[in-house]
Image (cartoon, grey):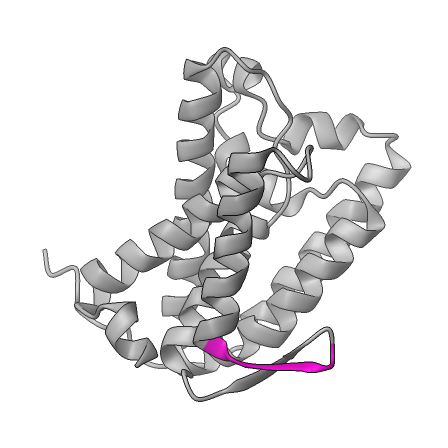
Amino acid sequence: MNVRKPFRYSFNNAVLYLVGINVFIFLLQYLSRNAVTYYLALIPSEVLSGWVWQFATYMFAHGSISHILFNMLALFIFGRQVESGMGTKEFLLYYFSTGVAAGLFSFAVYAAAGVNVALLGASGAIFAVQLAYAALFPRSIIYVWGILPLRAPVMALGFTALEVLFSVTGLQNGVAHLTHLAGFGFGWIYFLVRFGKNPWKMFK
């Protein structure tokens, strides 16, 4: 099996569908008064009881309007360009494999520590998408908060460094920093294995 065999290129606006599905599910969460959230979020105790679908569905559930707003904004801004660069099939494989892998890694850590949380949000996969954007478009300039111009690799590495800081210091409790870092890490591994390219060299 050739893990580097490329897909035939196509561009089908999958990011728009992903955004739409996320918004639709968020509405269901609101209308069901969080019953849908419990069913979709990645909860270690429920996964151990057989709810293995949560490794994928947690990516489509969000905890608040601001949570889904920032995630979908990032997915739209960076995901559209990454999908255009990779092609839709490659992008979807990248998005879901990094998101699910980030969920599996987080589950393993939380389960081993005996911590039962409700993990939800597309942030793990979106950190992987930001990495891909920085690798594919390293000369691109991003205006962080609309005012601070940064090259895409500086932005991606900067946000990741902040996640490390927050994880170590315990700042921003209630945010799945571990999952964000896992998404970034698995995105890096994907580039090495699937494309045979080191993102660090692509940044330069």
Q: Is residue 43 left or right of residue 151?
A: right
**Is residue 87 covered in magenta?**
no
Q: Residue 182 falls in which quadrant of the image?
A: top left
The answer to whether residue 24 of the structure is visible from this angle is no
* For residue 89, above or below residue 63: below
Q: Is residue 115 above or below residue 194?
A: above
Q: Is residue 97 visible?
A: yes
Residue span colored magenta:
146-152
Left or right for 50, reference 148: left
Count of all numbered marks drawn on residues in the image? 0
Q: Position of residue 96 (x, y in %)?
A: 45, 52
- Location of the N terminus by quadrant is bottom left
Q: Residue at x 42, y 83 (%)?
A: 137
Classify the position of the C terminus by image quarter: bottom left
Q: Is residue 148 magenta?
A: yes
Residue occupying the far left of the picture: 1
Q: Is residue 128 left or right of residue 176?
A: left
Q: Position of residue 91 (x, y in %)?
A: 42, 67
Q: Position of residue 22 (x, y in %)?
A: 69, 53
The quadrant holding residue 95 is: bottom left
Q: Looking at this view, is 168 or 82 the one in front? A: 168
- Point 59% across, 23% down: residue: 43
Is residue 145 positioned above or below 61 on the image? below
| Front residue (pair 203, 13) | 203
Residue 32, given in percent of the width and then of the height, sits at 86, 32
Query: Residue at 54% across / 71% down in the picture?
Result: 79
- Of residues 39 and 193, the one drawn nearer to the viewer in this rendering: 193
Residue drawn at the location 27% of the way across and 55% of the way down: 189
